[in-house]
Image (cartoon, coloured by chain):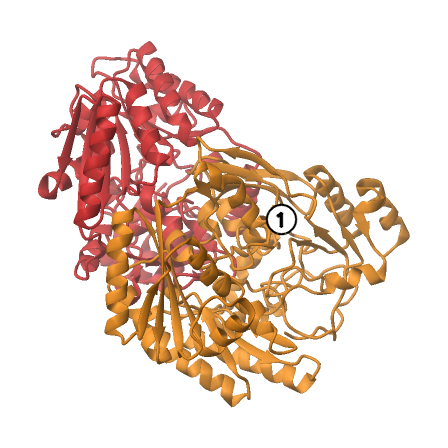
Amino acid sequence: MNKRLISELHNILGDDGVVWRPEELLLYEYDAMPGGKAGRVAPDAVVLPRNAEQVVRVVRLAAQHSVPLVGRGAGTGLAGGALSTRGGLCLVFSRMKRILEIDLPNLRAVVEPGVVNLDLSAATEASGCYFAPDPSSQKACTIGGNVSTNAGGPHTLAYGVTANHILGLEVVLPTGELVPVGGKAFDTPGYDLTGLLVGSEGTLAVVTKVIVKLTRLPEAVKTLLAIFETVDDATETVADLTARGITPAACEMLDQFTLGAVEAFIHAGFPLDAAACLLIELEGLREAVDAQADQVEEVCRQHRAREVRRARDAAERERLWAGRKNAFGAVGRLAPNYYALDGVIPRTKLPETLRRVIEIGARHGFQVGNVFHAGDGNLHPLLLFDARDREQFARVVQAAEDIMRLCVEMGGSITGEHGVGIEKRDLMPLLFTDSDFDAMQKVRSVFNPSGLLNPDKVIPLSKSCGELQVRPLPQTAGA
Amino acid sequence: MPVATTSLEHLLGAQHVRTDAEALARFRVDGRSPSAVAEPANAAELAEIIRWARENKTALLPATTGLYLPVGNPPAALDVAVSLCRLNRVIHYDPADLTLTVEAGLPLAEAQKRLAEHKQFLPADPPHADQAALGGLLASNASGPLRFAFGTWRDFVIGMKFVTAEGKEVKTGGRVVKNVAGYDLAKLIIGSLGTLGIITEVSFKVFPQPPATATFVFGFDSIEAVVEAARRVIHSSWQPLLLELLNPQAGDLVSCQPLSPLHWSLVVAVAGVEPVLRRYQTDFGALARELRAGQLDILRGHDEQFVLKAVRERIPRALAKNPATTVVKAALPLAGVGPFLTKAQQVAARYELPAAASAHAGSGVANLFLMPPPEMADAAKRMAQAATEMVHAGNNLGGRVTVPWCPTEVKHDVNVWGPLRDEFTLMQKLKKQFDPDRVLNPGRFLGGL
């Protein structure tokens, strides 16, 4: 990267707003996508803007110099969406973390993209509201990142994904234009640009402000832990709950392997000898929650649940959820690396799919842990491996691909909430045709015609047009 | 200008290219009729029609039942209407997974009938819910009272197929309830009034019917009281299905007991098992006493369905009663509903226009119905001016105001989509990318998109 660009960045952001020494950039070669060091590309510089105006100036500068630009929140993404594949600039939003407005009468909040997901709920809880999307990384991940990936979480079962909670954005286009889209009200006339931008993985615009919907806290919450002797009993319970029209606020499954890992780490109170547990949460009016809890317990028992435990108090409930939300981390303690997959299937196919996922893992020589949003049919098989062993790494990538193919075969999708990024990019043709990619590319060419904004993501390279005028892409890890 | 329809007939068979008066009248928009109505049997035939239209510089009007055609600007060009009425199959229904895939020409009511066999439903109750077909409802982003609990189409459509102006079939999303693979083009197409592509197939997540429902109708003697009641419901742990506010004139328009021209009414429907409904009865009784409601009625069963339908269908009822009605829609921040309705009623009074007012109060969407008396000679002018003032009033409250239903003459003097904002440039570019020759519904959407 040329010295002039660095010095111009310093002019915009001050001395402490630009990270450019190679040793400081190493961190930004990674997000939470698995894989070893090989093929990683660091950005040439990381910039830490304090406000939208600085973002605009950085974006303009990047355009002038034709350097790629990648936005990044907390780096908790699992699909490589925030990685710089061609160097260039990485825009990190850790200094844009102000909650600009909490508008209680209208049940809205306006935040900067770097606000941590859980911090918004913490700031509004006393007023009886919260931000409903709750990705498991919510203690760290940012709302900007949630918007970028259209993040989910356990409670999306009842409350919907991030897109259902975003009403407006302020974005910077790659030309440096600042454009507000949507607003505090619903039904903005014209095309639903907010809806289009949420989940576009930073490939269309840089988000500098987010208008979110706040949700009223429920009057009552009940958390049930249903314990099963077989995985099939647990998955069939989920399919049956769905078929009977019982919609809990969350319905999560953890298998024996994951339960063991979590207990060793969190001591959440999960049984170690069960084949699977369902963590089911019910929310609403007291009377509704009571009735639902009885119904859920009955269905669990019909499917041979050994025990259905009801959390007695908030402390027990929080322990159970801590166990669930730290499950990836807990499993991560057992091996040098783990690969958290993200696939979706129709819920009627859960029992069969999970059996075949375990078979695929075994065929490639991997133990598979399963901890996932069962009520949505959103699987998260976890594969343990050692990325330093290149042969093993290649095998884990193959196993992941086989599992994704299985999800598609079952009528599902290759990602429910983590995004496509680099990780799933080349699997996209499993779902989409050239015409479909052409339509996506049309959208990209409207917002990001130069392709400099988050290049090499989402659309397979052979399907995206417009050659980038930047230096050639080095060999990537392939994950 | 008449269009040579022989090649269309060759494509579809002569019986599916209609030029009879009845067919042409059905797809008449703002005084203009198409010269033919093409009825493709499937997406492939639709793609052929579009390619043909593009080659022949022919403007297409996509439609299903035609019930929502009054919404939008007068067309910039209109040659051939494309009716999707033959694309009316249920493609895939998996009751145990609560997912449904249908073709765009299927009437909403047919989908509901099919879902009801398994005690499920689509939580969409827009005006014309009993007749309108899904494609048109999605393209015009039509919604009704249930949006309070379930959102709008964008919140429960999980996948879609559409044909582009290039005549290519495009798929987005899928049949699973959670899916972030690729850009969410369904969000772009929903509410785009057929200007970017023509929807052929839609997948939904559907919902279980609640075990039981009850509807509470509060009567208040002032707008302040009814707005306060709505506010209390919105900012509570209660979880109603819908929250509808009607002024006395709207009560008269809906005209079924216990809604009446004597009160400002708040209609609140709730769902749940019997203990939940009893709880609401207790809570709402207390709320009514505290806020000094003049009346509180509880409806169940047939009476309840009758009233909910009347409330849902208030726009078609107003238009049936007085075809000159102009409906102004304000999408506002929640707290803007009361101030907007107050202001809008003052404006209507100043122009001596009888006005009914109502709102999806929990969603911040207010509707003003201007219903001029037949003898008012300059009604169109007055309604256009009043609507323009309401557009400004809504803007000042942080909302966006449109005029979805009005006579053609009113459209000459008011911008029915409201003012343009910065984001419009992006919309223009999208239109240019997707439909450079302006074949699809030209001119009818925001800013003439």
Q: Quadrant of residue A356?
A: bottom left
Residue at the far right in the pictured view: A3
In percent of width and height, residue A70 lies at 69, 55
Question: Is B317 displayed left or right of A270 in the figure?
Answer: left
In this orientation, which residue lies closer to the viewer: B435 or B424? B424
Q: Amino acid at mark 1?
A: Ala
The residue indicated by pointer 1 is A205
Secondary structure at numbered mark 1: loop
Q: Quadrant of residue B265?
A: top left
Q: Color used for chain A? A: orange
- Residue shown at 57% from the left, 82% from the top: A398
Residue at the far left in the pictured view: B302
- How many numbered discs, if any? 1
In percent of width and height, residue A23 lies at 83, 62
Disc 1 packing (10 Å; few <14; some 14–19; many ≥20):
many
In this orientation, which residue lies closer to the viewer: A105 or B93? A105
